[in-house]
Image (spheres, grey):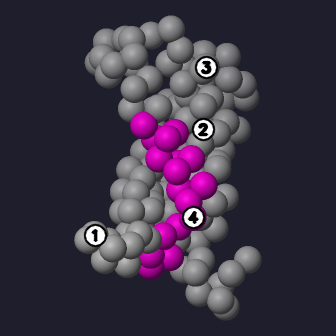
Amino acid sequence: MLDYLYLYQDWGPFVLRVTLGAAFIAHGYPKLFKMFGGVAAWLDSIGIKPGKFWALVIGVVEFFGGIALVLGVLTELAAALIAVVMVVAIVKVKWGKAKYIDLERGGWELDLIYLAAALTILFTGPGAFALDTYPFLRY
C-alpha cells in the first residue's frame, strides 16, 4: 500500500545532510572568522594543545565540512570528520556534565544527535541532489 514511498527513499539522507551541513556552517564560521583567538585560548585552557592548530582544524572541519554536506561533495569524508569532532567534543569537553543542554554546565545531548546524524550520512550516503552522485564528479 505504501510502496510509492520507496520512490523517495533518497530524500531522508538529503534532508539530514543539508540540515546537518547548515548547522555546521553556522558553528564553524564564527570559529574561523570571528572568535578564532578565543577558541584557541579556550582549547589551550582545557588541555587541547596547541590551541591555534586545533581551533583551525575544528573550524575548517565544521565550516567547510558543512559546505561539503550541503552540496553533497565528498559527503562521506565530511560526515566522518564531523563525527570525529563530535566524539572528541563529547569525550573531552562534555563528558561528566549534564546530559541535557544546560546553559551553565553544558551538556552532550545535542552533540550526540550531531554524531548520530553524521554517522547516518556516512553509512547511508548522500541521498538525493548530491554532487557526489554525478559521474564526472565521483571520486
**Marked residue nearer the N-terminal end (3 or 2):** 2
Q: Which residue is mark 2?
A: 85
Percent of width and height locating residue 64: 55, 59
**Marked residue nearer the N-terminal end (3 or 4):** 3
Give the structural element (helix, strand or loop) at label 1. loop
Three-letter amino acid code of the residue under disc 4: Gly
**Marked residue nearer the N-terminal end (1 or 4):** 1
**Marked residue nearer the N-terminal end (2 or 1):** 1
**Marked residue nearer the N-terminal end (4 or 2):** 2
Q: In the rendered structure, are the residues bearing label 2 and label 1 in contact, judged by CB atoms less than 8 Å apart?
A: no
Residue 20 vs residue 4, the one in the foreground: 4
Q: Which residue is mark 3?
A: 92
Distance of mark 2 from mark 1, alpha carbons?
A: 38 Å
Q: Is residue 127 magenta?
A: yes
Q: Which residue is mark 4?
A: 125
Q: Which residue is mark 1?
A: 2
Distance of mark 3 from mark 2, alpha carbons?
A: 10 Å
90 with respect to 104 (left or right): right
Residue 30 vs residue 81, the one in the foreground: 81
Percent of width and height locating residue 58: 60, 42
Mark 2 or mark 1: which is in front? 1
**Marked residue nearer the N-terminal end (1 or 3):** 1
Magenta residues span 113-130
133 with respect to 35 (left or right): right
